[in-house]
Image: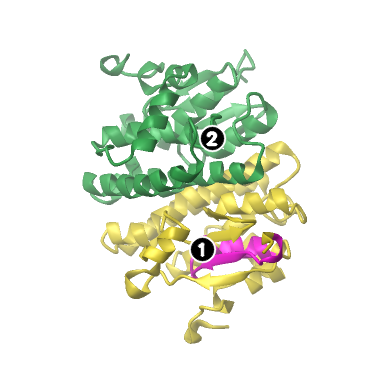
Chain colours: A green, B yellow
Amino acid sequence: MDSSGRPVLYSYFRSSCSWRVRIALALKGIAYDQEPVNLLKDGGQQFSTEFQAVNPMQQVPALKIDGIILSQSLAIIQYLEETRPNPRLLPQDLKKRAQARMISDHIVSGIQPLQNLTFLKQVGEKMEWAQHNITCGFKALEQILQHTAGRYCIGDEVSMADLCLVPQVHNAERFKVDLAPYPTITRINKALLELEAFQVSHPCRQPDTPAELRA
Amino acid sequence: MSTALVKPVLYSYFRSSCSWRVRIALALKGIAYDQEPVNLLKDGGQQFSTEFQAVNPMQQVPALKIDGIILSQSLAIIQYLEETRPNPRLLPQDLKKRAQARMISDHIVSGIQPLQNLTFLKQVGEKMEWAQHNITCGFKALEQILQHTAGRYCIGDEVSMADLCLVPQVHNAERFKVDLAPYPTITRINKALLELEAFQVSHPCRQPDTPAELRA
């Protein structure tokens, strides 16, 4: 057991899934320790026997908290929401809450798995498929945001959807996807990156960020 | 006309595991609804039509028109149904168990299904072995997780959202000829769930758009 009793986040600096949870922890003011898991070194540290005991799914993020270990970023975020409700990350209005989940799921199930390391290996490292999937996903997201967005994805309050958006935009930039067709996504992303929680959690500022990528 | 008097409309494909999850939820909660079939293979994929894009810009099933809005993404839909029609419950009251239910659901919905669906298969060049590999990896992890969480069902003895994700994924595994012998817990739970009426009436073999040769 960690001597401080603080939550422990298993994370990779550049993992968009890990970044979502880092933002949530920052927004809710939850102090935690990080255990870096390098997805590329040693054949991928997520495949080690030690880490498999932490998360059989062999993925980051995983969060050790309150005596349990949780994986899957949205399951973790909603657990944090239900146990540490302030500030809220899901709208009180049930329809808006459903829209926040819908946008989150679109990114988490509909875009990211079709451009992550596993996927790229299986399509033979063809970047164009990753770019295609991000492009298709962002085209749909831009349309949806026409109906839901205010300053942020759902009106003017930060929600789980925003925690998914920023890391996915960062991935899009890394894959050199042209963001000009997505003015709403771009505007919201810019507004969110001004918030401290999105900055302290940024891949360029993590314990395991390589020196050449550090902010 | 009051939206409260209009039945929900589910855009669904009989064999879509994502659609089946929502059909189970609607059946469990006793919510009467109409179906609009969307054939994912005919006409180049009816999900890509201009009409359907207006329903769901993500061009996927399921989508549910309910209470004056249209929702997509199966887990967002199921949790909206849970929060507006809370009986019977589909998420545990205990917050840690609830997190585990979501974790298992997300593992299937984000970690397995997208890596074996129609879009994926097209992009890996129809290589079935990748779909089988991804289901196998996913089930190996799931079998381990269920050691800690399962009772009669995925989370103890009450049906939860995780079970709604499990059964359709097992059905996909069978369609992809994945050997299920290494997963006794998954197999046992799947069998127990298929005995429940909601999992039967929602089954792909009993839908309005089920082809005659596949109909039960």
- Image quadrant where residue B187 sits: bottom right
- Which chain does the numbered disc 2 sit on? A
Residue stretch rendered in magenta on the structure: B4-27
- Which chain does the numbered disc 1 sit on? B
Classify B123 as above or below A59: below
Q: Nearer the viewer, residue B3 or B28?
A: B3
Residue drawn at 25 percent across, 39 percent down: A177
Residue A98 on image: x %, y %: 59, 46
Q: Which residue is mark 1?
A: B17
Residue A170 on image: x %, y %: 34, 31
Classify A186 as above or below B37: above
Residue A100 on image: x %, y %: 55, 41
Q: Residues within 10 Å of mark 2 (few under 14, many from 20)?
A: some
Q: Which residue is mark 2?
A: A155
Classify A70 as above or below A30: below
Residue A126 on image: x %, y %: 22, 47
Residue drawn at 65 percent across, 72 percent down: B200
Tell which tag, 1 or 2, sits nearer the viewer: 2
Secondary element at image label 2: loop
Alpha-carbon distance for marks 1 and 2?
32 Å
Identify the image quadrant of the C terminus of chain B: bottom right
